[in-house]
Image: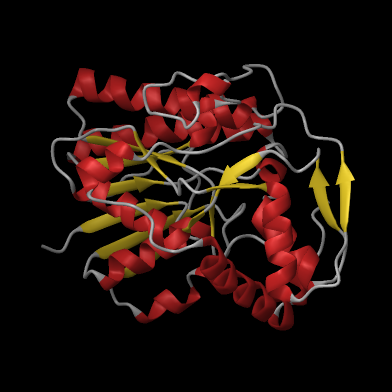
Amino acid sequence: MAKRILVTGGAGFLGSHLCEKLLKKGHSVIALDNLFTGNKRNIHHLKNYDEFEFIRHDITEQIMLEVDMIYNLACPASPIHYQYNPVKTTKTSVMGAINMLGLAKRVKARILQASTSEVYGDPLPQFHPQQETYWGNVNPIGIRSCYDEGKRIAETLFFDYHRQNKVDIRIIRIFNTYGPRMHPNDGRVVSNFIVQALRNKDITIYGKGDQTRSFCYCDDLLEGMWRLMEKDGITGPVNIGNPNEFTILELAQKVIELTNSKSKLVYEKLPSDDPKQRRPDIAIAKRELDWQPKIELAEGLKYTIEYFDNLMKKEPDAFEEIR
């Protein structure tokens, strides 16, 4: 049955792919975005769908809509963006969650919170891979705290609205995700490495490059998100990510190989509070959602490199450094 679905952050990297996925399933979609990190080019092709609508709006302000489902993805998700205005980042997570939960309560909509693996902070070694029962190891006053703690408070609000007001909630904890439509200057490791490699510039490795991440291609991530939203009788939180673990150095070498780049590796000091390991335990997703990622890193990187290569040729201004 077709539904009317709101996607906050709908012009962003993941939000735009989600809007497209939902439209292809026959739903009516409203994309809400303040365009701080989102971009209209990400959703330009969706104008061909009669059931698609874009509204420029900041979720820190209330909005009245009639919808059946809400996917709350709005929030800067890369350090360079969420640290640009840390107070606004926290407001987006906290006030945004309150506003969207209030909307869900009024119209009796099911609502999903796009949370993050950052709620685990820098996991202690005995909690690797990270399970949903782990409470995390987060610095509440660090430079990343605006994002980490904002997302943790949003999870609290979701469960409080669920317990107190019977709001139908879902919480997904997203691990490192990559793919086409990532912001060229978002400072995340995959986009950084690809852009540097395509320009044959030095690839910056922070620390020794032995810190690990688990990289999930966007299509796999969104399939897990959709299955969680469609499943009855589950609130989450549910980890969605790729459990295959790579060092940052291995990622850099793979990108250089796939781009045939002349880039060299340079090493800089590791940023404050940067997690040493990050890998999801996806047992709940496998059991409850029958989900696991399908796209291997090399395949996903090829799609992502192709996107950035084309964008660089069409819109070179998009690669200007953020100041």
* 1 to the left or right of 291: left
Specify whether 317 is left or right of 122.
right
- The single residue placed furthest to the left in the displayed view is 1
Q: How is the image coloured?
A: secondary structure
Q: Against 104, is 160 above or below?
A: above
Tell me which residue sits at (38%, 34%) in the image. 99
* Residue at position x 37%, y 22% in the image: 133
User: Percent x, y for residue 162?
Assistant: 23, 25
One can see residue 185 in this view? no
Quarter of the rendering containing residue 78: top right
Image quadrant where residue 88 sits? top right
Nearest to the observer: residue 83 or residue 85: 83
Near-viewer residue (239 or 130)? 130
Expressed as whole percent of the image width and height from the top left, the position of residue 169 reads 25, 35
Left or right placement of residue 238 versus residue 314 in this view: left
User: Up-down: is 110 above or below 298?
Assistant: above
**Placement of 301 over or under 192, stated as above or below:** below
Looking at the image, how many numbered discs can be counted on the residues?
0
On screen, residue 20 versus residue 4, left or right, reads: right
* Residue 265 image offset from top left, x and y in percent: 86, 56
Q: Residue at x 64, y 29 (%)?
A: 87
Task: Identify the residue at image location x=40%, y=36%.
Answer: 281
Q: Quadrant of the N terminus?
A: bottom left
Q: Is residue 146 visible?
A: yes
Whole-percent x, y for residue 108 in the image: 17, 39
